[in-house]
Amino acid sequence: MATILVNGVKREVQAPSDTPLLYVLRNDLELSGPQFGCGLAQCGACSVLLNGKEVRSCITPLAAVGDKEVTTLEGLPTRWAKQRGLSADQAAKTLHPVQETWIEEQAPLCGFCQNGMIIKATELLERVASPTLAEIKEAFTTSGPSPHLCRCGSYTAIIQAVQRAATRMVKRSDVL
Ligand code: FES
Ligand code: FES
């Protein structure tokens, strides 16, 4: 048995230590944000944050989590609320700005890749407040083990959503 910290909550799981984190999240913890795409770290659909860094959960064994914090798509509102010091009440009504702008830009088409796109965007914007277009493209193409792939081709909307989220996150940080 292992205890891991997921979305701010300690969770006990019975899975063997070499079980891919993706299976633990989806099958044991019923978190369906991370998707199974390739299973080979080649598409990005399964991405989660591990201590704020994007990892491909399909190739990350449970043993590699240790005491690091896992954040999934489901945990982004809480993560943002914590970063901004919001109350539990406010947090329950909050989406992460990246999620808000994803909706506003209607970025998903079939939606299958979008978990990884949103996780990658969040990682980028926590690291770089106002990324250039080149930095956004670099984040999605060369900063991980492989590019984040979207078979529907929603890349333009994704870039627009990232740019809009960057502006919003900077503005909201200003009013803290
Ligand atoms: S399912 Fe993990 S990278 Fe494709
Ligand atoms: S929206 Fe369909 S794969 Fe990206």
Image (cartoon, helix red, strand yellow):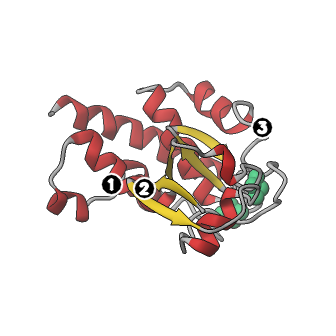
Say if 38 sits above or below 167 in the image.
Answer: below
Q: Residues within 10 Å of mark 2 (few under 14, many from 20)?
A: some
Image quadrant in which the N terminus is located: bottom right
Q: How many marks?
A: 3
Q: CA distance from mark 3 to mark 1?
A: 27 Å
Of mark 2 and mark 3, the one earlier in the sequence is 2
- Secondary structure at badge 3 equals loop
Which numbered disc flags the more N-terminal residue, 1 or 2? 2
- Name the kind of residue labelled 3 in the image: Pro
Q: Position of residue 28 (x, y in %)?
A: 59, 73
Q: Secondary structure at mark 1?
A: helix
Q: Position of residue 94 (x, y in %)?
A: 27, 59
The residue at 50%/58% (across/down) is 73
Dot 2: element: loop
| Image mark for residue 20 | none
Residue 11 vertical position relative to residue 80 in the rendered view, above or below: below
Residue that badge 2 annotates: 7
From the image, tell me which residue sits under label 1.
Answer: 78
- Kindly identify the residue that appears in the image at 19 percent across and 42 percent down: 85
Q: Is residue 80 visible?
A: yes
- Reading the chain from its start, which is encountered first: label 3 or label 1? 1
Badge 3 local density, few (<14 within 10 Å), some, or many (20+)? some
Disc 3, ligand 1: is the CB inside 8 Å? yes
Find disc 3 in the rendering and name its residue: 145
Counting from the top left corner in percent of width and height, residue 164 is at 41, 42
Q: Are discs 1 and 2 less than 8 Å apart at CB?
A: yes
**Distance between mark 2 and mark 3 Cα atoms:** 24 Å
Q: Which amino acid type is shown beneath numbered disc 2?
A: Asn
Ligand 2 shown in quarter: bottom right
